[in-house]
Amino acid sequence: MIRFEDIISRFDGKITEETTLGEAIQYMLHHKWNLVPVTDKGGKLTGVFTRSEMYKMILEEKELTTPIRDAIKTQAFTLQTDTPFEIVEKMVQNSPVGTGVVLNPSGGVAGLFTKTDMVLALLESSNLLKEQMETILQHSPIGVLMTDENSMVTYINDRICEMSGKSPSDLLQINLVCLFPEFAELLQRQNTKGEAEYISLSFPRCKTVAYLTTYQRMGGQKGYIALFHDISELERISLDLETVKNLKRMLETALENAYDGIIMTDKKGRVEMVSPPFLELFNLDKSRIIGRKIDEVLPSLKLTHVFETQMAEFSDFQEENGISYIVHRIPIMQDGVVIGVIGKIMFRHLHEVNNLLKKLQKAENKANFYKKQYKQSESARFSWEHIHSNDPYMEKLKRSAAKAAKGRSTILIRGESGTGKELFAHAIHNGSARCEEKFVEVNCAAIPEDLLESEFFGYEEGAFTGAKQKGKIGKFDLANGGTLFLDEVGDMSLSLQAKLLRVLQEREFYRVGGTTRIKVDVRIIAATNRNLEEMVKNGSFREDLYYRLNVISFRIPALRERPRDIEVLMEVIIEEMNRLLGTSITGISSLARNAFLEYHWPGNVRELKNVLERAMTFAEHGKIKIEDLPEYMNKIESFQTFPAGTLYEESEKKAIQKALLQSRGNKAEAARLLGISRSGLYEKIKKFDITTQSVR
C-alpha cells in the first residue's frame, strides 16, 4: 500500500523573506520546482514563492539581490504527511493547484507534492499491482483466460495450458468460441444478462468447471474472463465419501441384523455403535448408551482391558437375567495402536454352538486322518515357503537350492540332525520340473540292512522265504520319473553302496531274484549328518559313490549358528501347535524368551519344536512362562536368588532392549514380543532408564 510521505519531494533548504531573488532562482532551477515554501526563523510556513512571481520580479527588472519579501504568497495549498493516500488522490483531482506544501505533525515543512509525483506514484503502484496479479495468476491452481471485446484471447496463465494440454501459441489471439465451442451459448447469454455462469468442460487430463464473466476494458468496451476449476480431485473425494457412507450403511445394516450382540467403542472407550440383540440382552435404550463410556454403562464386559493387552480375548461364562453369555473382546488396530474395541456378545443357544464345536472336532479328526494318509503317500509336502528364516546365509542357501532344483544333477544335503534337511529335499523336488511326479523317501538308517536291498530294488515272486506271491516293486520303481530321497545315506552298507552306484551310473537295476534289467529315470537327493570325507578315508564309505552323490552339495547350518531364526521359528511353531494341540498360546514371557535365545540347541529345530510342544501343553495363562520349560532350560530360580539390581534385573533389562531393537522402537510391538502390557513396558523402561540411543 502506498504511503503519502514516501512519494513527496523532500524540502531540505531554508527559504525566508530575506532570501534574495537570485538565491530563490538558483534553488528553483536546481530542484525544477514551480514554487518553494517560505518559512520563518522557527521553520514554520509563512507562504510560498512561485515561478510566476519570479517572472514578474524579473520583468520589473528587480536586482538579483532584492529580497523576495514583497513577492511571497501567504495563501498556500498544504497537506499533512499522515494524510491517507486515498484522500490525497481525491484532493489532487479536485484542486486547481499543481503543487502543494506538505507539513509534518509539528507544523514544519516536510516537502512538496506535485501532480507529477501523484502520477508517478500511481504508475508505480499500478505496475506493482500488475506484477503481483500476474504472479498470483501464474501460480494459481485455477486456469485463467482473458479476451478482448472481440472474444480474442489476450491473456492466459500456465495452469490453463497444463489443463488443456495446449501451448500458449495454440491459445493466444484465438477466438474463445473457436477454442472452446461450449462457450458459445454462454457468450450469448452474457450479452443479454451479464451474469457469471458456468459449464462443465472436460480436458484430456482433467475435468473442470468453467466460469465465464465480463470485465470493463478501456473505452467502455467489454471483455471476458474464463476461470477453469479442476474438479477431478473433488470427484474422487466425493466417490471416497460415498464409499465410506455405503460402508457405514452396510455396517449399520449388519449390526441391525446381527445374530449376536455387538457393541463398538472409539479410542476413548465411548460407545459408537450397538446392535439390537445387545440392547435386548441388557435391557438398555440406544439413545442412553451412545456416546457414553462403556465402563460406566457395563463395566462387567471389561472391554477397555483390550487397550492395555492389545490382543483379542474371550471372557468366562457370565450371566444376565438368567441368560449365559460369553464376551469376545476384539481390538481395532491402526499403525500398531488400538483405536477402538469391538465387543461380541454370544448368548443365543450356546448349546447349539457346543454342537457345532463337536461337529468341527469330528471334521478336524477326519481332516487329520486324511492328512496322515496324505503324508503316507509318495509326494513332497513342503515348499520354500515352509522354510522360515531371517538369516542371510539361509536366504542365500534357499536361493542356491532353488536354482539347483531346476536341473537334473544329484544333490547332497548335509547338516546336523534336526536342522531341516528333509524340508530342503521336499522343497527342491517341488521346485523342479519333476514336481508333478512322485517323491519317494527312504531312511537308510531305519530299514534293517538285510531288507534294504529289497526296499530299494524290489523282488520277484519266490525270491526268498516270506516273499509275497506276486513280488514287490522297490523304491526306485516307485520313484521312476520323479525323485528318490535317500535320508541318512551315510548309514548304508558297503555292499548296498556298490549296487546304488551302479544304478546311479547305468540308470538300471535288477530286482532281487530277478533276471530282467529294469531302466529307471530317477533324480537322487541324499542327506546325511555324517562326515563322509572321514568315512571315505577310513573305508566305510565308497569314494566313487561319494563323488557321484556330491555333485551339488549344501550344508544347512545348525540353529545355534543362526540365532536370529529362533524367534521366527518360535512364532511359526506356536501357530502350528495351537492348531494341532487345540491350545490358545498367544505369546512368551520375557524370561522364557531369554531362555530360548540363550540356549545352544544341540537338537536344532527338532529340539526347539519338542520344547515348545511341551511348554504349550503346560502353559496355563495363555503365555509360555519360564516354569513351563524343561528343567535344563529353566533358570528362573537362579535369577530369583539374586537381590534387586543384580543378574535378574540385568537380564530383564537386556530382554527389553532386545525387544525394542527388534521392533525398531515400536513400544506396542515390543510389549507384545515380551508378553507384557504396554503400560507395564513403560514402567520397566522408566525403571531401567532405557533410552532410544541405548537400544541402537
Image: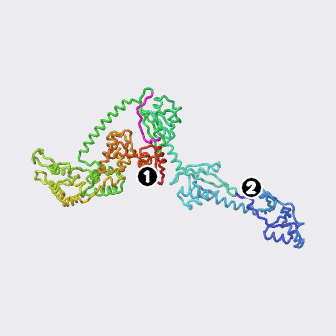
Is disc 2 placed on a helix, strand or loop?
A: helix
* Left or right of residue 140: residue 389: left
Is disc 1 placed on a helix, strand or loop?
A: helix
C-alpha span from label 2 to label 1: 68 Å
* Left or right of residue 618: residue 25: right
Looking at the image, which residue is at 48% across and 50% down?
Answer: 689
Disc 1: which residue: 661
Residue 185: where, in percent of width, then height?
Answer: 59, 50
Question: Is 56 drawn above or below residue 605 in the view shown?
Answer: below
Name the amino acid, label 1: Leu
Query: What span is colored magenta in the figure?
Result: 307-320
Q: Residues within 10 Å of mark 1 (few under 14, many from 20)?
A: some
| Quadrant of res 121 | bottom right
Residue 269: where, in percent of width, then height?
Answer: 50, 38
Disc 2: which residue: 86
Say if the magenta span includes residue 394: no
Name the amino acid, label 2: Glu
